[in-house]
Amino acid sequence: MYVELAGAVVLGVVIAVVLLKKKQESLKTQDGWWGVGTPLVSPEDDSIRPFRVETTQEQLEDLHRRIDQTRSFPSLEDSRFHYGFNSSYLRKVVSYWRNDFDWRKQVDKLNRYPHFKTTIEGIDVHYVHAKPKNLPEGVRSVPLMMVHGWPGSFYEFYGILPLLTEPASPEDIAFEVICPSIPGYGFSEAPHKKGFDSVCAARVFHKLMKRLGFSQFYVQGGDWGWLITTNMAQLEPKTVKGLHVNFAPPAKPSLTMMMSVLLGRHFPKLFDFSEHDIKRTFPCVQKLVVDAVKETGYLHIQATKPDTAGRALNDSPVGLAAYILEKFSTWTDHEFTNLEDGGLERKFSLDDLLTNVMIYWTSCSIISSMRFYKENFGKGLDQPHSKIPVIVPTGVAVFPNELMHTPKLWVKQKYHKLVTYTLMARGGHFAAMEEPELLAQDIQMFVKIVEKRM
Ligand SMILES: *[C@@H]1O[C@H](CO)[C@@H](O)[C@H](O)[C@H]1NC(C)=O
């Protein structure tokens, strides 16, 4: 007993010393080059080239031929979404895709915002650039970069873009929004060399914003977008005026966090725990572990051998749709696994869901998108960015059905200047697509506070 106590005290002192010693440093990085072969010696082509989404008739015919040749396989009776995508519902989705989905119309929608490509570190980076129209005299827009995740794309932001660029109220801020595709996703070229992780993406996106002439701006993201924008804040804290995330999984456990796990249920006030925190943080440990194992198989595959499973998805549109859309079901609401149709059409339209699938299909990007897990997890979980705090003003929108819940106290361990922490009324992982109004409101509130406009 005394030995344990003494051990705990020593441990506490050691941790305290380590914590006190840590200085507020920014993340360091070095230029990379991801093109084919050896790097260019001449300076890089820094032109910005307009881009349009285009699909040829041959590509569409090839897609239809592959859909027609799919080999159906029945799901187990009453298996709903428990074994993955239910095959009866998959048949419906595929039939809609083949017979009713109008890709040409969706392409027109995609091209309603201007797209561009520019070469950074040897690869072509794609982005959408949405500017406010009819700004009144003297009113300046606020630049904001929004970064998507997996298995999403820049299209996730198409519902929120009009709300941010053309806000209804004159009190609201009009944003100029830049939505890049992560290299290897959608229309951004995939890196040709090993090692392209979230910090590399953050560095590339900083270069993109500099090339566009922005010296200071806001960043927003969920899923991988959360990590990339967090890294952007760590790389250049003076350039990033504010960071808004709708996903913030717990950072490296600190002493305070461990104490809160041990004592939080009994002394919630001590740790500033809300009822939602208690409900999400303290199911029995066994349940937490079992749930984590049930829902993270994709992650283990993608973090180890992405190129193997990826080949099947790259050949089969039906397999690709099942693999991607299963996540849009489970990550929107975990209870949706109990429904035959995965609840997909409760929050999304098939047109929007299939447009996201088509972005992966037509750009052949599923394999390179999966590799991003390998590049990030392959280096171990103890990367410098996981140890360095974020010192720029931060806003966190906590959606109740998010995959992981992080109480405010835990968020503060990583994000030292937490300005807003909002428990949102409803919504899950794909917040921008599922609840564009709510997310837009929270971004407005956060930026107004940071800009001292309220
Ligand atoms: C899912 O699909 C199979 C047929 O592929 C069917 O037998 C099963 O009952 C379906 N529905 C549910 C609710 O699991």
Image (spheres, helix red, strand yellow):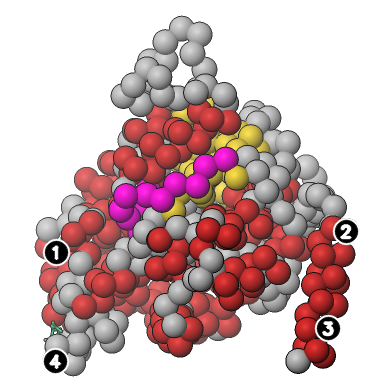
Q: How many marks?
A: 4
Q: Secondary structure at mark 4?
A: loop
Mark in the foreground, 3 or 4: 3
Provide the residue span drawn in magenta.
419-433
| Residue bearing the label numbered 2 | 21
Q: Which residue is mark 3?
A: 6
Q: Specify few, some or many for label 1: CA neighbours under 10 Å numbering under 14, 14-19, or 20 or more.
A: some
Q: Amino acid at mark 4?
A: Glu
Q: How much space separates mark 1 and mark 4, taking CA atoms?
A: 23 Å
298 lies left or right of 317: right
**Marking on residue 96:** 1
Q: Amino acid at mark 2?
A: Lys
Give the class, few, some or many, for how many residues have Cα within 10 Å of label 4's Cα (few <14, many ≥20): few
Kindly indicate the quadrant of the structure image that contains residue 135: top left
Task: Please name the residue shown 66% across and 56% down the image.
Answer: 414
Kind of residue at badge 3: Ala
3 or 4: tag closer to the N-terminus: 3
- Of callouts 2 and 3, which one flags the residue occurring earlier in the amino acid sequence? 3
Q: Mark 3: which secondary structure?
A: helix
